[in-house]
Image (cartoon, helix red, strand yellow):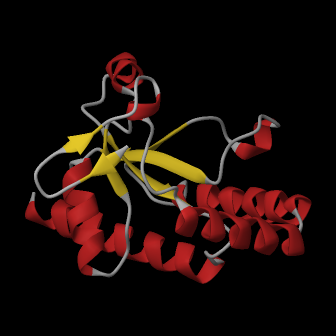
Amino acid sequence: EDVWLEYSTYVPPPGRFEAGTPAITQAIGLAAAIDYLTEIGMDSVQAYERHLGNYLYQRLVELPKLEIYGPDPSSGLERAALCAFNSELVHAADIAAFLDQDGIAVRAGHHCTQPLHRALGAAGSARASLYIYNTEAEVDALVEALQSTIQMFEALG
């Protein structure tokens, strides 16, 4: 209610538990993001994500000794513009660390899906996630760096 140097008074519950300053900056940012996506068109966003996600999947299946989780896009089942995967030779955390050295960000770990990873018999996985700001050239760079990383570990025996 009031704040003094020596003491404060409080409004009765539930008012005293309400948040302070509203998230004004976040609301303005959200409005700008909505305007941006509206201008592009959500159908265009979805089509681009589908195309890029399929491209990612098709590029990753070219790599030997890589297990990709989820349905093949050609199966007709919907999938997000991401691929979770594991290498027979390289732990997912090592994949993420080595790709990071090439400026490529992927996630590694359970991705909040520990029961799924247990069912797959996997300690975790690496995951590449795409959105409208990604390009086929970036997917190609990911695949090239991933192939190089796997080949390096393969050479180590």
Residue 134 image position (x, y, % from top left): 61, 75
Residue 43 image position (x, y, % from top left): 90, 59
Vertical placement of 121 versus 93: above or below? above
Q: Residue at x 17, y 62 (%)?
A: 153
Asked whether 45 or 80 is in front, the reply is 45
Q: Which quadrant holds residue 26?
A: bottom right
Q: Which quadrant holds residue 112?
A: top left
In the image, 58: left or right of 1? Answer: right
Q: Which quadrant holds residue 154?
A: bottom left
Mark yes or no: residue 90 visible. no
Residue 142 image position (x, y, % from top left): 45, 72
Mark yes or no: residue 45 visible. yes
Q: Residue at x 38, y 16 (%)?
A: 119
Residue 11 image position (x, y, % from top left): 39, 33
Count all numbered tags in the image, as a single digit: 0
In the image, 66: left or right of 26? Answer: left
Asked whether 125 or 143 is in front, the reply is 125
Asked whether 141 or 44 is in front, the reply is 44
In the image, 117: left or right of 21? Answer: left
* The C terminus sits in image quarter: bottom left
* The N terminus sits in image quarter: top left
Vertical placement of 38 versus 141: above or below? above
Q: Residue at x 21, y 52 (%)?
A: 93
Q: Residue at x 58, y 35 (%)?
A: 70
